[in-house]
Image (cartoon, coloured by chain):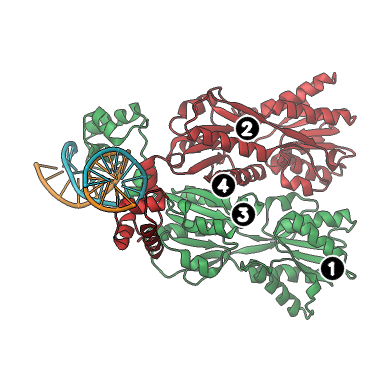
Chain colours: A red, B green, C cyan, D orange
DNA sequence: CTGTTAGCGCCTTCAC
DNA sequence: GTGAAGGCGCTAACAG
């Protein structure tokens, strides 16, 4: 059985109050008493009970991060950085995944594990803006990536501009038929939509007509989806000579298929991804990509959330974090 | 302000007890009352306070997973599967990372976030067996991968056998000089040690002498470490024609370096990794690997932990989960 | 079937 | 400087 404040007090021959003071190093404790309590604390291996403390002061020191999939490289990397940022700020991060399930997102937004955290970072996937904005009661919420509602804080990159840059780069390479891989018309989530928008803008700016058959939808964002979409593109009567993939995972799947089909990257087909995931730096060839500054994103998101937890009630902020196009071998 | 049981009771004109009964759908509530309470519950958008509930019944319904790095593909995949397994069992998983830091491991083992979870799954890295066994007080603990102490539950693959199989496969391919990449002599963690042991056993079984210069240590297990180690191997007067890498990440880094140096895989150099991480299925060439059954591992670990949480006091069990050698292009 | 109440462990206001 | 006591929200033992 874990020992409580009272046990320690008894052992040290003082009152609970004094022990509490020592534990939270408050002033007003004589050095002698403090020392005595200290040793009692150690002998009993006392640890404050977080449930009780949380109940009492309404704060747990815990921050929650909810992502669709913890095992997708992008979210895994992001989670790692957010955990680091939280750690630096003296908070502890706990991570939850929803597998893209609306119910789970909903539950985590206001259910048990959104219950004992002081604030929540959410990367929405299946939930509509209205639901997110509506359900947000109680703990502060900061949205990652998606900007849903002007009433809730948001941190993310400018997807439209980033996609435009990536596409423009492919066009500047002299490619004639630039495809877009990764549309998700079945989702409320609008990230893919923003990226197509940027893609189309770049095409238009270059005086190119939009070609609907070069815009390929995918179910999810895994390598296998990229592979399937690439097979589709290569089967076209007039296949593309460049593809802008909406995530690195999609691009890596597409790249593998290109190789299997004898299509040389970048000679026959230039590829650019999005996310700057570790794998893309080591693939063969290495993958050009739009690199969101994930460390800054994590830092800003945690800072904003902690400010809210601290009681800040300034109007909701939408912060755009930097990104950069990294040209590597797949589009050199 | 969130509404409490009392608020609801007041609104419905009943006692807290009755509301509590309804919330936890206990019996002994008349349908009429139940309905009345239900609507009060909804009107007030009542949500149980987890801190209070935990304080009261000493259980939170939360399980914790502590891994060195949440952004390494292996741990990310494992975390995803463990979260799924927990979900299926009605528990919620929270994930923490330590970045391989002994202090953080220590803190998480018994600190705040090990305080409000009912049980802990730990993949130790920097902590010594003695510390792990000693610090384990309070919540049940199940060790993942490393088998530290007979007194604590453990689930993992047979690293020695797996490494032996992988090495034997390379030998059977007719390779003359088989290297081992990934030793970690600086860690208390013994996974690498077990894998070298299996490697040496296979060599011995084939009547080959051990060649110390073919056993390459690494600092960490990332691609960059694999790349560095590979450069070292290729600079040897008599470089290997096969390498068994202790993780897929190391292998992927090594593979990229081989390509840069014009060494053909698998013709000039056969490669086998360990972990069966998603990337290796899509790399070029695809990566042969030892595939631990991660889903089973997750399932068993969660089941065992929940049994402990439920009060099981059978002697500590050490479970070996299955693994399989997957021969793909890098050693075909 | 339902109401009343003690107490989980902690912090903190009030008294000394 | 330190002690006593109340109460955070919930559950369950004890009435009725």
The spot of residue B36 in percent (x, y) is 26, 29
Query: Gap between marks 4 and 1, in whole Å?
Result: 43 Å
Element type at marker 1? loop
Query: Gap between marks 3 and 1, in whole Å?
Result: 32 Å
* Of labels 3 and 2, the one closer to you: 3
Question: CB of mark 3 within 8 Å of CB of mark 4?
Answer: no
Task: Identify the residue under disc 1.
Answer: B240
**Chain of the residue under label 4:** A
Of B66 and B18, which appears nearest the observer?
Answer: B66
Residue B287 can be seen in this image: no
* Of labels 2 and 4, the one closer to you: 4
Query: Gap between marks 2 and 4, in whole Å?
Result: 21 Å
* Labels 2 and 4 positioned on one and the same chain: yes
Task: Identify the residue under disc 2.
Answer: A145
**Chain of the residue under label 2:** A
Q: Residue at x 64, y 49 (%)?
A: B71
| Quarter of image, res A326 | top right
Query: Gap between marks 2 and 1, in whole Å?
Result: 46 Å
Question: CB of mark 2 within 8 Å of CB of mark 1?
Answer: no
**Residue B99: which disc?**
3
Question: CB of mark 4 within 8 Å of CB of mark 1?
Answer: no
Element type at marker 4? helix
Q: Residues within 10 Å of mark 1 (few under 14, many from 20)?
A: many
Query: Gap between marks 3 and 2, in whole Å?
Result: 25 Å
| Quarter of image, res B47 | top left
Element type at marker 2? loop
The spot of residue A140 in percent (x, y) is 49, 33
| B332 shown above or below B171 | above
Element type at marker 3? loop
Q: Earlier in the sequence, mark 2 or mark 4?
A: 4
């Amino acid at each position: 059985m874990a020992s409580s404040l009272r046990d320690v007090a008894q052992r040290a021959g003082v009152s609970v109050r004094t022990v509490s003071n020592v534990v939270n190093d408050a002033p007003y404790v004589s050095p002698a008493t403090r020392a005595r309590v200290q040793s009692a604390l150690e002998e009993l291996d006392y640890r404050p009970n977080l449930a009780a403390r949380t109940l009492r002061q309404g704060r747990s020191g815990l921050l929650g991060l909810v992502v669709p999939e913890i095992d997708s490289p992008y979210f895994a990397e992001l989670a790692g950085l957010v955990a680091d940022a939280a750690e630096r700020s003296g908070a502890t991060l706990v991570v939850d995944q929803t597998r893209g399930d609306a119910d789970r997102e909903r539950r985590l937004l206001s259910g048990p594990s959104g219950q004992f955290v002081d604030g929540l970072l959410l990367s929405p996937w299946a939930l509509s803006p209205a639901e997110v904005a509506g359900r947000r009661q109680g703990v502060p919420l900061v949205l990652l990536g998606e900007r849903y509602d002007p009433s809730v804080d948001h941190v993310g990159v400018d997807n439209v501009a980033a996609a435009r840059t990536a596409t423009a780069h492919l066009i500047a390479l002299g490619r004639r038929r630039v495809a877009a891989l990764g549309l998700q018309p079945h989702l409320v989530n609008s990230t893919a939509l923003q990226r197509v928008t940027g893609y189309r803008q770049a095409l238009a700016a270059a005086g190119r007509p939009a070609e609907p058959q070069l815009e390929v939808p995918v179910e999810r964002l895994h390598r296998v989806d990229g592979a399937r979409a690439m097979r589709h593109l290569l089967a076209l009567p007039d296949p593309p000579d460049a593809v802008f993939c909406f995530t690195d995972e999609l691009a890596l799947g597409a790249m593998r298929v290109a190789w299997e089909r004898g299509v040389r990257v970048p000679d026959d087909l230039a590829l650019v991804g999005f996310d700057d995931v570790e794998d893309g730096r080591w693939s063969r060839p290495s993958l050009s990509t739009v690199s969101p500054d994930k460390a800054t994103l994590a830092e800003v998101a945690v800072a904003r959330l902690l400010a809210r937890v601290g009681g800040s009630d300034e109007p909701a902020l939408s912060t755009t974090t930097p990104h950069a196009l990294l040209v590597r071998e797949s589009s050199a």
